[in-house]
Structures are given as C-alpha cells and as structure tokens.
Image (tube, rainbow, N blue to C red):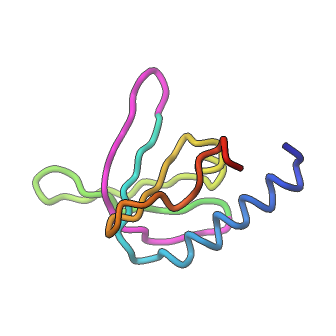
Amino acid sequence: MELSKQAALVDDIHMRLKEFTGKRLKLRANMGRSKIIEREGTLIQAHPQLFIVEVDEKRGRTARQSYQYVDVLTGTVELTDASNGEPLFPALDTI
C-alpha cells in the first residue's frame, strides 16, 4: 500500500474516532505472544497521533490505555461500537 494512501487512511481513522469521543466502545487488542485483551470503555480523547480509552477494570476501577491510529490500520486493535456491536472500521483485507 502506498505511503500517501496509508496517511489518508490514518487521517480518516482519526476523524472518525473524534466523532466517537465520549461514547462507549469495545476494544480488542492483540498484544503479541498470543495475548489478546478484550475490554469495554469510553473514548476519552483523540490526539493527532494517538487515542485514549478509559477501560473498565475489576471491582469498579478504571484504567486509561492509549493506542496509535496505525494500530487500527494494521488490525492490531479492533474497535466496535458498544451500543450496536458493529465494527467502526472495515477489516484490513477490505481496504
């Protein structure tokens, strides 16, 4: 994939996530070595290079996790709308 196309896709991801600020998301992150994290939380901020999700932990606690837009582009992080269960972004194969 061309670098200019990748940059445009990252910008699209950034703009789409800005619209979801304050909304509930389901997050699935592949952390490597067969470690996959699945959490639900609220999108707190969408910065130019990364986005921050406040995820629900055990016993009512919360934690903040940050990810880069490139993680979404490469499929390392998958985001789903918690209200309807639909993926926010198409799979990498369909791009």
Q: Tell whether 29 sits left or right of 94.
A: left
Tell me the magenta residue range.
31-48
Residue found at x 53% / y 52%: 67
**24 shown above or below 72:** below
User: Which percent across, then down, holds residue 60?
Assistant: 13, 60
Return the residue nearer the eye: 63 or 56.
56
Q: Main secondary structure of the magenta part?
A: strand
In the rendered image, the quadrant that contains the N terminus is top right
Q: Quadrant of residue 65?
A: bottom left
For the point 64% across and 44% down, which residue is it?
Answer: 92
Residue 36 highlighted magenta (yes or no): yes
x 40%, y 64%: residue: 81
Is residue 57 inside the magenta stretch?
no
User: Vertically, is 25 above or below 74?
Assistant: below
Which quarter of the figure has residue 55?
Answer: bottom left
Task: Reply above or below: 89 against 28.
Answer: below
Would residue 39 appear left or right of 44 to someone viewing this image? left
How many tags in the picture? 0
Residue in view at x 80 percent, y 62 percent: 8
- The x, y position of residue 2, in whole percent, is 89, 46
In the orientation shown, which residue stands out farthest toward the front?
94
Question: What x and y, as percent, mark residue 93?
Answer: 66, 41
Q: Residue furthest top?
A: 33
Q: Nearer the viewer, residue 54 or 94?
A: 94
